[in-house]
Image: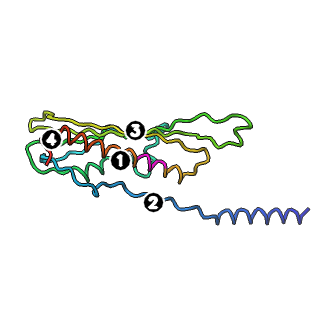
Amino acid sequence: MKSFDRFLLLLLTFFFISSGCVNTPPREIFPNLRYSHFKPISLAVNSVEINVSYVSPKRIPNVEHKFPIVPTKAASNWLEDRIRPSGGTDSLRATVTRGSVVEVELPRTPGLKGAFLVDQSERYDGELEIVLEIIDPNGRRRAMVSSRAVRSKTVAEDSTLSEREEIWFRITEAMMNDLNAALERQISKHFVIWRR
């Protein structure tokens, strides 16, 4: 019996030592979403004020605070990179009013059948909105444009954290691509007298 105990002790020791030596893969580094490679949008304003009014609750069902690139940060980057003041009496007030991503639990296949299937377990619903306002020297709004982007994506129940982070990054990237195109159109249409 003593030899069996010794064998069991050696086996457990080997298990704990070997499990401590397992290397976890490093977390992927995602690029910071920047937009300086696009042509700047020059407006006849003396300043650009950037505000983020959306505040994440930082708790489930909201998950945007876990994203590699937080949606509101990507929106702020867009405003910094693309909008250029070229001088004038008016100013531009830019506000990121939405930047949420909500995790929605999806129904899974019950019973024995469910044990052999890999279901889509969660859906991530993203919403991102930017409002641009031209403000005159007296504080009155002369013109306004806004655009809102929404994207959804499901993930499989066996997805790793790295796979989820990749999906989260792509959600932010897709919403920003939508906003980039939509705001260009809105500005060209409604800020005509300020375009330079």
Q: Which amino acid type is shown beneath numbered disc 2?
A: Ile
The residue at 69%/34% (across/down) is 110
Q: Position of residue 170 (x, y in %)?
A: 44, 49
Q: Position of residue 34 (x, y in %)?
A: 32, 55
Does dot 2 land on a helix, a strand or a loop? loop
Give the quarter of the figure containing the N terminus.
bottom right
Question: Is the residue marked by circle 1 packed among few (<14), some (14-19), or many (20+) residues within 10 Å?
Answer: few
Magenta stretch: helix, strand or loop mostly: helix
Q: Which amino acid type is shown beneath numbered disc 3?
A: Val
Question: Is the residue marked by circle 4 packed among few (<14), some (14-19), or many (20+) residues within 10 Å?
Answer: few
Name the quadrant containing residue 55: top left
Q: Earlier in the sequence, mark 2 or mark 3?
A: 2
Query: Residue at label 2?
Result: 29
User: For residue 18: magenta?
Assistant: no
Query: Residue at label 1?
Result: 177
Q: Which residues are magenta?
A: 167-172
Query: Residue at label 4?
Result: 192
Q: Which amino acid type is shown beneath numbered disc 1?
A: Asn
Q: Which amino acid type is shown beneath numbered disc 4?
A: Val
Mark 4 or 2: the one toward you:
4
Front residue of 183/106: it is 183
Query: In the drawing, what numbered circle is on residue 150?
Result: 3
The outermost residue toward the right is: 1
In the depicted structure, whether residue 110 falls above or below residue 89: above
Q: Are marks 4 and 2 in contact (CB under 8 Å)?
A: no
